[in-house]
Amino acid sequence: MRTGRRTHLLWAALFSGLCLITAAAARAQSPPPAASCQPTPTPIAAKPAEPDADAGGIRVFLYDADKKPLARKRFYLLRRSAFSAGIDWASMPRRADFLQGASPQLREWLARHDCDSLYCPEFEAEFPEAVKTVPEFKRAYDDGLRKYRNEKLALKWLAVNFPLRNVRSEYFQRKRAWLERAGQQAGKVVSFMTDEKGRAIFTGFKAGDYYLSNLFPFGEGGPVWDCKVTTLPPNPRQMWAVTYLLSPPAKQTAPSP
């Protein structure tokens, strides 16, 4: 009787563990949340095309839910919807997975910057202060002083001598490789960075339906936009403009007891 009971408890434990593993796998494989797109009803006439410019095209303005321009953000013009292209969302790299061995000071420093590697030009101005407050930067600086015997060179080559390769550039490399695969699956036409007004201009494309997407969330756990956009037949004297309001998914409220 006791043997049967122990066997029953063992099977129950195994079944519970299997359920937990399955649930965790399902969460890991689920795509990021989809955000909503609110375009202007139809493209409207914009300014005339520039002389000697490619004939025809479309101009896109992207705003967030508060109607602020999505400036300096990378988007992709795709032939297929990002959510129906079979993209392997489970393999999408997460920044947190590349912080193994990082000190609390380094984690806090990186959290204040939106950059995928230590080679961003805007970082250089902050390196002298980072050497004083972040152990990894101090170690890289000291290594540079021993190699070059020059303070300016030690600061200039701080990222090269940085002790943690996974923090230095590995996340950037993995993210770039993932985006290349995802873009191929979704039929990437072009990738682009919006300007300070949240604007992008496309010219030289055949008229038809495309999708506008960031493919990779701008923040950890953030949404992916998947906006259908129609380009118009080429016109040598006219550009067309479409404005999109890109809103994150509505937050789920807990049901009242």
Image (spheres, grey):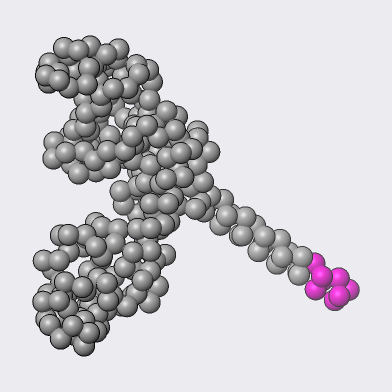
Rendered residue at 35%/58% (across/down): 172
- Determine the image quadrant of residue 118: bottom left
Magenta residues, as a range? 1-8
Of all residues, the one furthest to the right in this rendering is 1
Q: Is residue 56 visible to the viewer in this orientation of the structure?
A: yes
Q: In this view, does 55 lie to the left or right of 129?
A: right
Q: Is residue 243 above or below residue 175?
A: above
**Quadrant assignment, res 233:** top left
Figure quadrant of residue 119: bottom left
Which residue lies at the image location 48% right of the left edge and 47% below the top edge?
A: 89
Front one among 112 and 182: 182
Q: Is residue 11 above or below residue 253?
A: below
Q: Can residue 133 be seen in this view?
A: no
Residue 235, position in %: x, y?
23, 11
| Whole-percent x, y for residue 100 in the image | 40, 73
Horizontal side of residue 214 vs 47, given as left or right = right
Q: Is residue 155 magenta?
A: no
Q: Does the magenta stretch include residue 5?
A: yes
- What is the number of callouts on the image? 0
Residue in the image at 37% along x and 46% along y? 216
Seen from the viewer's position, the closer of residues 147 and 233 is 147
Question: Is 83 located above or below residue 114 in the figure?
Answer: above
Residue 161: % across, % down: 27, 76
Q: Nearer the viewer, residue 189 or 209?
A: 189
- The structure residue drawn at horizontal position 70% and vertical position 67%, both measured from the top left corner, is 13
